[in-house]
Image (cartoon, rainbow, N blue to C red):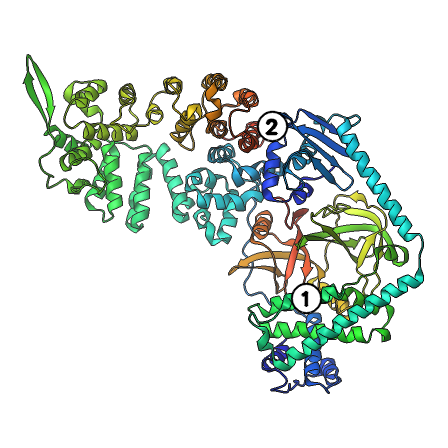
Amino acid sequence: MLFTLEQITRLAPDDASLKAAKGLASPGHWPTLGGGEAALWGECKGSGAKPYQVQMDAAGPAFRCSCPSRKFPCKHGLALLLLHTAQPQSFAAGPPPAWVEEWLASRRQKQESQAQKKSQDAAPPDPQAAAKREAKRLERMSAGAEELQRWLLDQTRQGLANLRGGGVDWRGLAARMVDAQAPGLGRRVQALESLAASDEDWAGRLLGAMGQLQLLLDGWQRRAELSPPRQADLRTAMGWPQDKDDVLQTGEHLAEPWEALGLAVEENDKLWERRVWLRGATSGRRALLLDFAHGHPVFEPLFSIGATYQMTLAFYPGAWPRRAVAVAPPRLVANAFSSRPASLDAEFSLVADALAANPWATLWPVWLGETRLVFEQGAWLALIPPDSQLLLQITDDDAWALAALGGGRALTLFGEWDGERLRPLSAWAERLLWTAGGPH
Amino acid sequence: MQALRLLAAQAMVGTERQAPALPPLPGGLGATLAALDQSDPAASLLRAAGVLSVCGLAGHRPAPQAKPAPAPCPPDGLPQGEDAGLAELFGPVIADGPLRLQAEALRRLAGGCLPHRVLPAALDLGRRNRVLRPWLLPVLGQRGQWLARQNPDWAYAAGTADDDNPEDAWETGSLDQRLIHLRRLRQTDPAQARELLAQTLPEAGAKERAALVAALETGLGADDEDLLDGLLQKDRGKDVRLAAAALLACLPGSRYAERMAARVDACLGLRRKLLRQVLTLDAPEAFGADWKADGLEEAKPPHEKLGPRAWWLYQLVRCVPLPWWAARTGLTPAELLDWAKHGEWRDALWRGWLDRQIQTADPAWAEAFLSHLPAPQLHADPFRLALALPPEQRERHWLRCLRQTPPPAGLGGLLRQLLLSLPADAENFSADFCRQVFAQIAAQTQGAEAGRDYYLRETLTEFACLVPPETFDDAWGLWNVLPDAVPGANAAGPRFAAVLGQRRTLHSHPLLTGATP
């Protein structure tokens, strides 16, 4: 099987496309169907005399269809995937027809020329030019940091009350931070904006976030005095993480079976972000695979939550190394794992240790056992024995699905803790029951 | 976080107007705060806030539980609940299937339960769509009832009803659950059901009383007359009195029906015409003093086209059991329709008879009406009238209707009318009927009119919800030979294919053994 239903659901540009695709996912609509693991193609009957020519290259995945739809992938492409998932036997094996071969060849050619270009780019390493570029960027970032420092002090002198209401140009300030190549600062400015507009204890929370920002700016100014791991954490917080190729070459490597605990996919202005949270089966170490995609949430490799993968991870540097990248494609070794979380106290001690090492992080993985879900006055809570509760950040659809599947049983819950609320990403009873945003 | 809130209160007006006074705190936190550079009040305020905020995060303690968790749902051991394949099937059906398909899917589950994953969507569907509740509530299973109790929006399903303890449904269930219980009991033991109803009526609200009384329609018999008569005379709710009157009119020997018949009888007369006695009728001259107590209205509604006397007559006729007419006059239904057709009070009589016919589904009267259609004065749906006929005759009649000169809307329009006349839980058509309809559609689509049949594809999708499994292949074959000239291929195609595919699974899945419709 190429893709699971859940993965195809994530590929769909909207619900309407997926619905239309489900209707087309029966062999009756397709006079011809062919392909295998590498590529799929077929002709789909449409309203015109000539059927649409639909093709998919599994490397990517990439789609092409002769229909006039502006959506991408269109319903025909999705239907082709759905049909292959349900009835792979309907696809004829054998070499692709000319119209498919042509497209695949052009894609191969493009990739080769890109790879060539990349190796040419990498070929003449000019350390002097690189150092110059880096100095230039640091200069810009520092200029942005100085502007933000002035702004923070001005606001504090004039009073927080001025930040409430519509008189502040948050967008402009955030955009200037991005222009200064410090997108991490831009994100923090955006967070200040939503805190200033929030209801509960807005002033205390806003001042806390401004204080944290102040400590970040202080740290940036004094970065030369700090250890290399702390410098790396600061750079990441400012929005300039280390280059992936560097991490692969110089980062700490760890090879073991990794358990996939949870997965979050988010969109922000057409930029998709995927977070895959892993746990080393032998070391118990937590790791985060963070990936971005433009336009469509297409990520590689695919992970099934609840499964175990053998792979080598290279960790980004830092005082509490957490983000990692896979050195080679993961190999599925088990569809389930039996490890279970420690106590609530142990989990929050871990959060405290992580914070002590890297106070710039903004999300922490939390894994809890014996959790019960409660809907109380419009809010969802997780109750954890002996006597604790956490406020959840979860959509009603997700929460009711989880409640229906759980039936009030004690569940193992994995999620992301943001300091105020827990966002559940996956839940287990005897086996994996639920994942956030999954198919309903 | 208390210290941070205190600091924020000071920061509201700005350090220019009010210098911050950092609260003295014990331990390492206090020492860290004291060590901060105090030269710039604004900067030191921000740094203190930063320290408090980060330390607050690191020292976070989850809040104590405000309330205990609800008791977990007891297991019911039904295999459908956790079946992934069934969840895949029911998900799209519940989310956006045609109503008939939803009803069929729920009925196929009878004796089992809905897959847990689709319960939230199913409970939402039942909330919006009351007509599905009689099939939805029995297949919620323990899990569905437990879930409904967690959400006030699903209160209609939140009783403790289950098949093992049907009495619980009556004692503690929602109105919908009580109605289901009452109707079921009426089928097996009408007297006991009436007992239960009589006991609960004094405690029930007017709206609930009206709904419960109307449920006596199931298994209605002469033994129900005393209870209904009492309600007609004494109940304070008008809807309750009307519901009782409507049921009494369905009991041919009831005192109520006899009073109505006597009032109509007073309007009948005989006149000598040549050598024969001719039956005559004259509408009441005045509204009787005791008519109001029997649920009749003296004043006609604002848009009523009948005159005042015809309005009174129509109300009387509507409440007289149809067999009384043959017994009183010696005429057949067809002869009675003819007799009225040429008289002064035709509209009042025809409408009254038609209302009564729809209530009681009398086959002889249905035939008589059908033979008079189309009649411009009579707003009767021929498809709905035919429902009173035995299945075979009914389908023959439908075919006749479909073969009449196609109206501008084409076959699609006629099929649509047929489907609209059928209840949500209508039985499947016969295979023979379906094949004849398919043949007719195939023939029509060869003609020049095909391009104008805007309803056809959309209606075929609805029609596909009622074709029997042995004709699934015929339906699929027909769809695929519909010429492109028939509009709507793009919009309706996926839906048609989905309905047939889902029905195939509904009729072959080993965990679905419910009533075959």
Q: Quarter of the image containing the N terminus of chain B? A: bottom right
- Examine the rendered structure and indicate whether residue B124 appears above or below residue A137: above
Q: Is residue B311 left or right of residue B44?
A: left
- Image side of residue B280 versus residue B513, left or right: left
Image coordinates for residue A91, horizontal then vertical, percent: 72, 27
Give the letter of the chain under mark 2: A
* As drawn, B434 above or below A330: above
- The answer to which image quadrant residue A210 occupies is bottom right
Residue A81 is marked as none
- Front-most of residues A304 and A223: A223
Please tell me which of labels 2 and 1 falls first in the chain.
2
Q: Residue B289 location in percent, x, y? A: 10, 41
Same chain assignment for discs 2 and 1? yes
Q: Identify which residue is drawn at 64% across, 87% down.
A: B19
On residue A48, which mark appears? 2
* Residue A395 picture location, percent across and down: 58, 54
* 2 and 1 marks in contact (CB < 8 Å): no
Q: Between residues B50 and A38, which one lies in front from this camera angle?
A: A38
Q: Secondary structure at mark 1?
A: helix
Residue A1 in sight here: no
- A352 with respect to A122 (left or right): left
For image coordinates 84% across by 49% down, the residue present is A311
**From the viewer's perspective, is residue B425 above or below residue B447?**
below
Q: What is the C-alpha distance between the residues marked 2 and 1?
A: 49 Å
Front-most of B399 and B116? B399
Quickly name the residue at label 1. Answer: A174
Towards the viewer: A70 or B267: A70
Name the amino acid type tagged 2: Gly
